Image (cartoon, coloured by chain):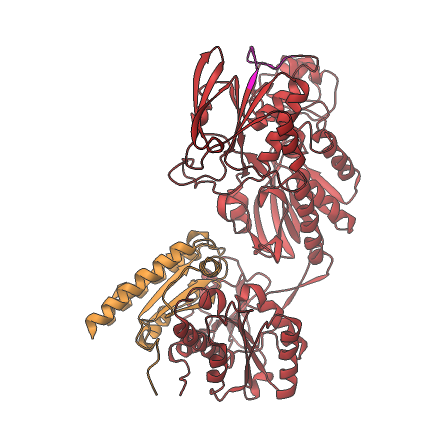
Chain colours: A orange, B red
Amino acid sequence: MSETVLDKEPKILVIATHACSYPGIDNAGQGHLEYPASVFVIRVPDPVLFPVDFYLKVFEMGYDGILIASCGTDSPYKKSYEKLSKRIDEVYKAMKEKGIDISRLKLTAICTVCAEHYVKEVREMYEKLKAMKAQAS
Amino acid sequence: MSQRTQENEEPRVGVFVCHCGGNISDVVDVEKVAKTISKDPRVKYATHFMFMCSDPGQNMVAEKIKELKLNRVIVAACSPKLHELTFRKVVAKSGLNPYFYEHVNIREQDSWVHSHEPEKATEKAIRLIEGAIERLTRQNPLKPGKKKTVPHALVIGGGVAGLTAALELARRDIPVTLVEKSPFLGGRVTQIDNIYPTGEDGKDLVDDLIQKVLKNDLITVRTNTEVVDASGSIGDYQVTLKITPRGVEEDVEGLDKAIEICPISVDNEFDYGTTKRKAIYKPYPKAVPNLPAIDWNTCTRCGECLKATNNKGINLNPEFKEDTIRVGAVVMATGFKPYEPLPGEYGYGEDPNVITLPQLIRIMENMDPNSKEFIYNGRKIKKIAFIHCVGSRQIEGVHTPKEGKELNTYCSRVCCSTTLWAANRLKKRFPDIHMFDLYRDIRTYQFYEDIYEEASRNNVVFVKFPDEEIPQVKIVKDDKGLFRIETTDILLRGKTVAVPADLVVLAVGIEPNPIRDLIEIFSIPYGSGGFLLEGHPKLRPVESSMEGIFLAGTAQAPMSIQETIIAATAAAGKAATILTKPEIELSPFVASVNLDKCEGTGRCVQECEYNAIELKEANGGKKAVIDPSLCAGCGACVPVCPNRAITLEGYDIDQILAQVEGMLKGVKAE
């Protein structure tokens, strides 16, 4: 099998929410803002759904970065951001134990019209991961 | 776990890739996508088509399901926010579980954002679809539960939007509770004494609605009432109301006298502070309800008013009460407030002759009808300068936002027409008056162009100033006027001009009423400027994406009265579609417990913020049982279970992991 154009690119998994960041990411598309193509979005009601080992499995699988595009404190679900923040602290702890660079995971909040903010976040993470990949090879 | 029926069959996936005219296919090689994805052995059919959302596109999906016995369908097209529902319906009509469908976003999140990298965009589309196949072939058929609808609507706000929505709901035989925070009905429209194009008084216009509302047995009106808490969801909300007592309990003799002798005098909000009112007050003689009300923030309970009524009718120490009602849907008609300029903005607050447009309208109504001259603050007004876009269309670096707020970047839409309508009325009444209109752009949209033409005929001098240069209002008190406004005039090829004026009128924009508490209580999404956000700007213009919440009028965006009534009518119609059905289908995306795995630790019970989980005796032990009508579907309970006994239906972690892995691996072209 030959290598494809995205094979070498650092892969980012974006966890987006129905209420805020997914429409926000769509908004970047409506504005035709460009960002790297190796960004893959999944859509959930709230990232609070995921246990710590979910993140570790995603890294094990081969993703270079995970960007959690949460609703922040605007989450439609009660206390979910509080819970999510605590969970992500636990994920960072687990990542350190496993020797995974913690800058590969970022928790951010993207609103329904935060297109530019989103593009900035994915670009930043992409550049960081690219540099990390270059260093490793 | 859900019952297993269709998923016992081997997955037979159909993949349909949309061109979206060229929106997708100009960037993504749709033919290659379809060809590559068909190499996945689970895919029994893959194609591409010009417009999947069109009738021929939808029919093709239905036909292929039938012809090839497909049992899983993927459409790769625009955002699922647009057409996920469309295709779920197609799939359901074809006899499949509607959740055996995945909508892959290759427009907003692919072709439109990677237009300069077609090869990568094409590969991304393949990977996204492959992820969807992995997830979909593991998906269970979801079966949404049902709950009874409470056939009663709550309308929040007693202005023109709320009154209209209440009437429209009652017209469909739906009982309505209309709550209004202030002691009087009618809202902002009562503050406008002359409305284009008929010249009607807003008070009369609204009074007509109010009388119809009051006569309608299905509508319960509660003034001085606020929503302070709510629980539940679409179809059945429990809403807590706080009722502020009116203070005046009976229509007794001497109430007018009571108002007169009240020693407290405060700025009258009805006249935007251009007049004073008492602590016991009525905004205008015909205000409804017609009993005066007591403003508890300023009343000192001195008892003077009671002297005028012989100790009757007025209760200065009444009880503040709470009440709970159950409703199936909520219409948000909470309205707007005019932008209040910052101190010093165009001289506002520095000289009393710098006023806002709403203040001018109040001043015009309160003017002596026989006066041949426009006298304000003891000064004969000979020259008026209007300045447009104050608090609207603000630009970063040019305008200053209010503390803790963002700039109002939007156009308030009605100020241009309202300004020129006021200018024309002034000209009619005081033919000698000179008027200058300082604007950035003028939009007397809809049928209001004649207002602009009339203003031109009235010799209103139009001065177009640049977006990034704010006209400078200087107090000069010279023989030409009280103010001199220095500004660049684009129409005079950028020359600086000095406009004299005795009165500066700021055409202030529209801001939503501050309803942060309601937004939190009902978890309503809001957008730019704090306006409530519609589910979709084109396809769901009066529904919030929070189901069961409907938007009517200026709580959503700046609107004219006519547009407000259209929106309120539509919102009521939409709310009725829920309230006229005896049952409501619940979201299938709720948490469910695998009783075999559950050990009754109760962690999920503690974690749930919606009291949706209880420990009950089942399967020979204490087990967690979830009430799907209370479950909000957030998934917070899922990760806390030490036995992983809980699944958020539709969002099974293993299924998501399979999707994530599918996107990583993709399908290789050769």
Residue B578, position as x, y percentages in the image = 69, 58
Marks counted in the figure total 0
Residue B532, position as x, y percentages in the image = 55, 47
- The magenta segment is B373-383
Give the residue at the far front of this rendering.
B493
**Residue B259 appearing in the image:** yes
Q: At 33% from the left edge and 82% from the top edge, which residue is drawn?
A: A3
Quarter assignment of residue A48:
bottom left
Above or below residue B7? Residue B555 is above
Depth check: B33 or B248 in front?
B33
Q: At 47% from the left edge and 42% from the top edge, which residue is drawn?
A: B409
Quarter holding the C terminus of chain B is: bottom left
Residue A54 appears left or right of B186: left
Quarter assignment of residue B377:
top right
Quarter holding the N terminus of chain B is: bottom right
Above or below residue A36? Residue B184 is above
Depth check: A102 or B35 in front?
B35
Q: At 66% from the left edge and 43% from the top edge, which residue is drawn?
A: B563
Q: At 45% from the left edge and 60% from the top edge, which residue is drawn?
A: A32
Residue B318, position as x, y percentages in the image = 62, 28
Depth check: B251 or B488 in front?
B488
**Residue B548 appearing in the image:** no
Residue B167 falls within the magenta-colored stretch: no
Above or below residue B492? Residue A32 is below
